[in-house]
Amino acid sequence: MKPLSRRAVLGAAAVALATRGEGAVTAGSALGKLLDRRRMVRKFRPTPIPDEAIARCLHAAARAPSAGNTEPWAFVVARDAAIRQRLARAALDQAFVAEAPVVIVACADVPRSKARYAARGERYAVIDVAFASLLLLLQATEEGLGACFVGAFDDARVAKAIGLPPHVLPLAVIPVGVPAERPRNVRLRPERDIVHRDRW
């Protein structure tokens, strides 16, 4: 079977991050309540975000699992208005990116994974950074902040805007701030459509 491309893996991660569930399994649990509160936020207030809150988000992200404990993630935290504007333009002119007071670019340091897993390491690096990004989004929710996982952008323009070295791939542009909207609930596909027992 042909391996999934980086774009396909990242797209699947973005879809997973964009959904919301209220299933019986997590109902009432601390995790269930946090998942119910998490939304993709695209409107932000200009309220400054304390460094400590962002530090907690990054700490949570760094606790993600990774293949072989290679920890291939890296994060660029952009507060400078000009850089946020460049990132918004690189993200296909999605203006809301620049409206957030903080934009975090989640990156994959691919050689860290490839050193152990050769070509397969590129896939693992993408998966691992997606895991880390999800934990970052959940911690942002816990902080009372809003965030959005943006995967639609020009890789080269993002890399140039934040000065990435050639071996590091930008995988997500994540604006973070105080929400200025309450996004609608999102319906999940029913379990019978997505869960297969023993065989498809």
Image (cartoon, helix red, strand yellow):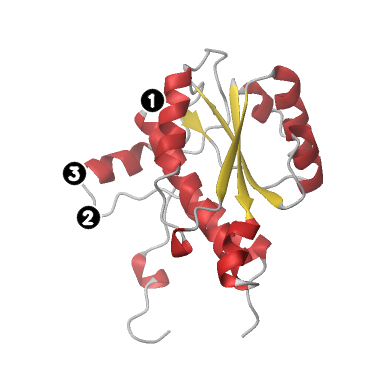
Mark 1: which amino acid?
Answer: Gly
Camera-nearest residue between 89 and 126? 126
Q: Quadrant of residue 97?
A: top right
Residue at the farthest top position: 47
Q: Residue at x 42, y 21 (%)?
A: 52
Dot label at residue 144: 1
Q: How far apart, in angstroms, are the residues tagged by discs 2 and 1?
A: 24 Å
According to the image, label 3 marks what residue?
28
Q: Residue at x 49, y 23 (%)?
A: 179
Q: Quadrant of residue 8?
A: bottom right
Q: Residue at x 52, y 52 (%)?
A: 130
Question: Between tags 1 and 3, which lies in front?
Answer: 1
**Residue 61 as seen in the image, left or right of residue 6:** left
Q: Are marks 1 and 3 in contact (CB under 8 Å)?
A: no
From this viewpoint, is residue 185 visible? Answer: no
Mark 3: which amino acid?
Answer: Gly
Q: Is residue 66 above or below residue 147?
A: below
Question: Between tags 2 and 1, which lies in front?
Answer: 1
Find residue 192 and report its horizontal and vertical position in percent.
35, 71
Quarter of the image for the N terminus: give it.
bottom right
Dot label at residue 24: 2
**Residue 138 as seen in the image, left or right of residue 117:** left
Camera-nearest residue between 10 and 116? 116
Q: Is residue 105 above or below residue 56?
A: below
